[in-house]
């Protein structure tokens, strides 16, 4: 399982759903701009409720991209220390996308999300219907790039791990069969390849 690092661009997004992260393994860093003089009480309380894995990083200095550069620096620093890191940047700022694409080409897992609910492990835990479960699995497989499972047994294990190993055999097989039926997964003997809905061209 990846070590999830969530970096919030608080100048751009002020999450109101931090409670979604409870019960998950993560490190949360909220980057606050130099000109942001206060943080809403409800947000501060929700952040404290998450314990020692969550905290603030108040940046110094001003500038149109000052906070973005701070986030980029911390991602690089953490990537150098943790080869198993998965970075989730919470921001509406598409300026992060070229950096994230570069990191992915370097085999560093990173994605930008507009909301905490879009993070794959959060999406999985909130998925109740078959449609939501398949969507969450597809999102997770997309994010894995070249490290996607290549064997049916590994795929089953990966899907079950996404659901914290709570799936019984029947549910697991139903989900894998549905991935095949929708063309997301192609099975040849015991080898797995992926359809255009997962593989980016």
Image (cartoon, helix red, strand yellow):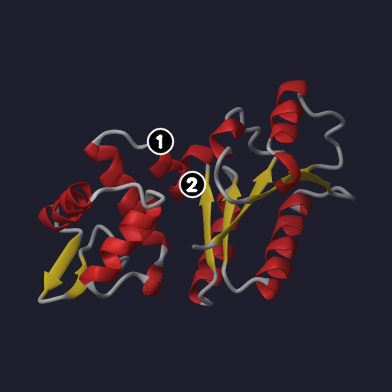
Residue situated furthest top in the rendering: 41
Q: Indicate the quadrant where residue 99 lies.
A: bottom right
- Image position, residue 45 (x, y; %): 74, 27
| 62 relative position to 107: left or right | right
- Dot 2: what SS? loop
Judged by depth in the image, the label closer to the viewer, 1 or 2, is 1
Seen from the viewer's position, the closer of residues 91 and 163 is 163
- Image position, residue 134 (x, y; %): 26, 47
Kindly identify which residue carries mark 2: 119
- Dot 1: what SS? helix
Seen from the viewer's position, the closer of residues 144 and 91 is 144
Residue sitting at x 87%, y 31%: 37
- Image position, residue 138 (x, y; %): 31, 53
Question: Dot 1, how many residues are within 10 Å of its Cα: few (below 14), some (14-19), or many (20+)?
Answer: some
Seen from the viewer's position, the closer of residues 138 and 25 is 25
Kindly identify which residue carries mark 1: 126
Give the vertical position of 133 relative to 99 (above or below).
Answer: above
Residue sitting at x 31%, y 71%: 149
| 149 relative position to 113: left or right | left
Residue sitting at x 79%, y 29%: 39
Question: Dot 2, how many residues are within 10 Å of its Cα: few (below 14), some (14-19), or many (20+)?
Answer: many
Q: Indicate the quadrant where residue 185 lies.
A: bottom left
Give the vertical position of 35 relative to 71 (above or below).
Answer: above
Residue sitting at x 21%, y 47%: 171
């Amino acid at each position: 399982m990846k070590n999830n690092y969530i970096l919030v661009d608080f100048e751009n997004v002020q999450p109101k759903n931090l409670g979604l992260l409870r019960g998950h393994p993560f490190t949360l860093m909220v980057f606050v701009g130099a000109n942001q003089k206060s943080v809403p009480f409800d947000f501060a309380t929700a952040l404290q409720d998450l314990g020692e894995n969550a905290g603030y990083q108040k940046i110094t200095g001003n500038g149109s991209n000052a906070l973005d550069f701070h986030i980029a620096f911390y991602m690089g620093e953490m990537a150098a220390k943790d080869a198993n890191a998965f970075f989730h940047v919470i921001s509406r700022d598409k300026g992060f996308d070229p950096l994230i694409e570069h990191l992915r080409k370097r085999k560093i897992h990173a994605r930008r999300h507009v909301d905490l609910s879009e993070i794959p492990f959060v999406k999985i835990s909130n998925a109740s219907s078959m449609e939501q479960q398949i969507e969450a699995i597809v999102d997770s497989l997309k994010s894995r790039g070249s490290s996607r499972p290549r064997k049916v047994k590994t795929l089953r294990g990966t899907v079950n791990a996404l659901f914290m190993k709570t799936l019984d055999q029947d549910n697991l097989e139903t989900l894998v069969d549905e991935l095949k039926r929708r063309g997301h997964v192609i099975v040849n003997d015991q080898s797995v390849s992926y359809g255009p809905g997962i593989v980016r061209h």
